[in-house]
Image: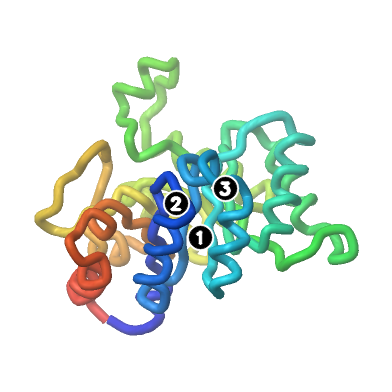
């Protein structure tokens, strides 16, 4: 394990208050590469919590999974850039026009939008879903094929990568190339529970498959000592 591996671990701040979130940041900063602010914390604390985590010198993945008409998503993305986030995501099923408009909004000159351009990721198929779940909502295609086609759509539209199950990493890399990022949740260290994840791997398996970043939440946050939990799972990842 080395510093590069550590920088590729993302910890979600899935709590309901800024004080809880900042306590996690204080305990884990320097041990992981990024903190994810999702719907729970964002709805509880609003955009100010993003500013506060960034002010701590930490990188933020704003995980709001935006999905709306092109103009609405593009404007929301521009606001996320002003918050100083390092990474954000949109649903690929929003369509190519929505994706391209958002890419264009994030590429605006510095005079019209402050902050560095964040990496833009597309949500493929949530790791809590399996083929049966997709069929129930009208998607009859093979799940891996659905994920790969969505990834190709995101790449054509100019996105930097996708969020996908570890089981689709290799197929996405084969279809889109090694430089197209894959950020994967559904990570469970050996011996931990699966909770609501249906398509998961261990950290070592996911990195071996080609993952660029791993999102690891409950196995770290629910441990008696989250910092020790991070160090333990990193020890299981080959250097």
Q: Nearer the viewer, residue 205 or 9?
A: 9
Residue that badge 1 annotates: 181
Q: Residue furthest left?
A: 191
- Secondary structure at numbered mark 2: helix
Instruction: Where is residue 148? Give x, y as percent.
Output: 46, 43
Q: Residue at x 33, y 23 (%)?
A: 133
Q: CA distance from mark 3 to mark 2?
A: 17 Å
Q: Nearer the viewer, residue 224 or 167?
A: 224
Q: Is the residue marked by circle 2 packed among few (<14), some (14-19), or many (20+) residues within 10 Å?
A: many
Residue that badge 2 annotates: 172
Q: Nearer the viewer, residue 172 or 193?
A: 193
Q: Residue furthest bottom?
A: 2
Pair 3/1: label in front: 3
Relative to 179, 158 lies left or right? right
Query: Residue 27, relative to residue 163: is it above or below?
Result: below
Q: Residue at x 44, y 71 (%)?
A: 33
Q: Residue at x 45, y 34 (%)?
A: 146
Mark closest to the chain's N terminus, 3 or 1: 3
Instruction: Where is residue 70? Give x, y as percent.
Output: 75, 34
Q: Residue furthest front?
A: 19
- Secondary structure at numbered mark 1: strand
Residue 1, located in which quarter of the rendered image?
Answer: bottom left
Relative to 60, 204 lies left or right? left
Q: Residue at x 88, y 58 (%)?
A: 112
Mark closest to the chain's N terminus, 3 or 2: 3
- Secondary structure at numbered mark 3: strand
Residue that badge 3 annotates: 89
């Amino acid at each position: 394990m080395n510093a590069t591996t550590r920088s590729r671990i993302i910890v979600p701040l899935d709590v309901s208050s800024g004080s809880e979130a900042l306590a996690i940041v204080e305990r884990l900063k320097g041990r992981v590469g990024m903190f994810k602010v999702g719907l729970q914390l964002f709805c509880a604390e609003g955009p100010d919590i993003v500013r506060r985590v960034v002010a701590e010198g930490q990188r933020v993945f704003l995980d709001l999974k935006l999905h709306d008409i092109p103009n609405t998503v593009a404007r929301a993305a521009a606001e996320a850039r002003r918050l100083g986030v390092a990474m954000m995501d949109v649903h690929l099923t929003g369509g190519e026009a929505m994706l391209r408009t958002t890419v264009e909004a994030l590429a605006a000159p510095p005079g019209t939008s402050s902050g560095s351009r964040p990496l833009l990721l597309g949500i493929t198929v949530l790791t809590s879903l399996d083929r049966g779940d997709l069929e129930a909502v009208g998607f009859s295609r093979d799940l891996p094929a659905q994920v790969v086609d969505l990834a190709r759509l995101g790449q054509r539209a100019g996105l930097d990568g996708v969020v996908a199950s570890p089981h689709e990493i290799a197929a996405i890399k084969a279809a889109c190339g090694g430089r197209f990022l894959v950020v994967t949740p559904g990570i469970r260290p050996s011996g931990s529970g699966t909770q609501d994840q249906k398509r998961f791997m261990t950290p070592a398996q996911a990195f071996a498959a080609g993952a660029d970043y791993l999102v690891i939440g409950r196995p770290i946050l629910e441990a008696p000592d989250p910092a020790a939990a991070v160090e333990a799972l990193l020890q299981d990842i080959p250097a």
